[in-house]
Amino acid sequence: MEDKVFKSINDIIKENKMHKKEYWEKTMRKDTKTDLIILINTLDNIDDLNEAREIINDRRDSLARKTKYSLVVGEEVTITGSGKIESGKIIKINRTKAVVDCFDKKRDCMVTYDVPFSMIRKVIKHDA
């Protein structure tokens, strides 16, 4: 019997103990991101680049709104920005930002930040 050169998707999913959705997100995003970068680099005028920027900004706003409606007071989140990632807990949800309570290591105390929804990521807890 010949050795299998290519593994089936189901074999890969079983080996890595992941769901099909996770597999597709991990594999498809890399290729899509690379294709997008190549396409952006082929644009040869400012108008096309501005149009691409508008599309990206609209998508970012859409994802931020989606994040806003999925957040709950008391939920653990991470904040991305300024080249660092901080974790905290949501205290209040406003119209355009959330109030997040974080621990500041320099001051050795809790601090409160008003954070735009586009900078907030939900903490996904994996049950072991």
Image (cartoon, helix red, strand yellow):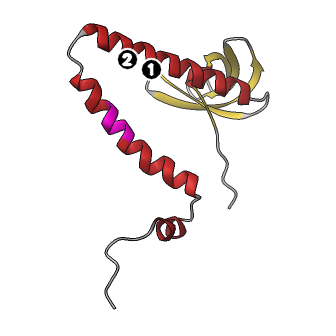
Q: Which of 103 and 6 is in front in this view?
A: 6
Name the residue type under label 1: Ile
Label 1 residue SS? helix
* Residue 40 visible in the displayed image: yes
> Mark 2 touching mark 1, by CB under 8 A?
yes
Q: How crowded is mark 1: few (under 14 residues within 10 Å), some or many (20 or more)?
A: few
Q: Is residue 7 above or below residue 88?
A: below
* Image location of residue 62, percent across then percent down: 58, 21
Image quarter in which the C terminus is found = bottom right
98 lies left or right of 46: right
* Residue 109 visible in the displayed image: no
Q: Which of 8 and 83 is in front in this view?
A: 8
- Quadrant housing residue 30: top left
Q: Main secondary structure of the magenta part?
A: helix
Q: What stretch is highlighted in magenta?
A: 32-36
* Image location of residue 88, percent across then percent down: 66, 31
Name the residue type under label 2: Ala
> Which label was assigned to residue 56?
1
Q: Mark 2 points at which residue?
A: 52
